[in-house]
Image (cartoon, rainbow, N blue to C red):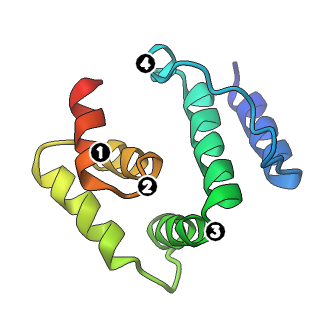
Amino acid sequence: MTIRTVLLSLQALLATPEPDDPQDAGNNNILQNNFLAYFVIIITVVANQYKKDRKLFEKTARHWSNVYANGPNAEPECDAAVKSLVEMGFPEEKARSTLSTMHWNTSDALESLCKG
């Protein structure tokens, strides 16, 4: 798989999001080393948040926008949760993505990080 293929796939997903069918993410443990599979897992989480809990979706979107695009609105609760897991020795990116997946519940994220 080339960077071009990944970027074209990303462009297609962003241009025509399908929250009712975000693709089958499969088993997270098997796919964790595959960037595209990991991306599909995140898209699945975001799509589920969008459909089931709009406030959580917006909170996650504000946090990710602030972190990766210097967005204007920080999410102090999310920042504190990431910081707490980083202080425990987990990589920042892994802490952030796991927290997003676990609806920003630090205990659930910690459990997931310790398992996998």
Q: Nearer the viewer, mark 2 or mark 4?
A: 2
Residue corresponding to mark 3: 54
The answer to whether 105 appears left or right of 3 in the picture is left
Instruction: Give the secondary structure at mark 1.
Output: helix
Q: Residue 86 appears at what percent x and percent y?
A: 19, 52
Q: Earlier in the sequence, mark 4 or mark 3?
A: 4
Q: Earlier in the sequence, mark 2 or mark 1?
A: 2
The image's mark for residue 103 is 2
Amino acid type indicated by mark 4: Asn
Residues under numbered marks 2 and 1 in contact, where contact means CB atoms less than 8 Å apart? yes
Q: Residue furthest left?
A: 88
Q: In this picture, is 104 found above or below 71?
A: above
Q: Nearer the viewer, mark 1 or mark 4?
A: 1
Instruction: Give the secondary structure at mark 2.
Output: loop
Q: Earlier in the sequence, mark 3 or mark 2?
A: 3
Residue corresponding to mark 1: 108
* Crowd band around label 4 with a 10 angstrom C-alpha radius: few (<14), some (14–19), many (20+): few
| CA distance for labels 4 and 3 | 27 Å
Residue corresponding to mark 4: 29
Q: Earlier in the sequence, mark 1 or mark 3?
A: 3
Q: Earlier in the sequence, mark 2 or mark 4?
A: 4
| CA distance for labels 1 and 3 | 20 Å
Residue 91: in sight, yes or no? no
Q: Residue 23 appears at what percent x and percent y?
A: 75, 31
Q: Which quadrant of the structure image shows residue 79? A: bottom left
Q: Residue at x 69, y 18 (%)?
A: 1
Amino acid type indicated by mark 3: Arg
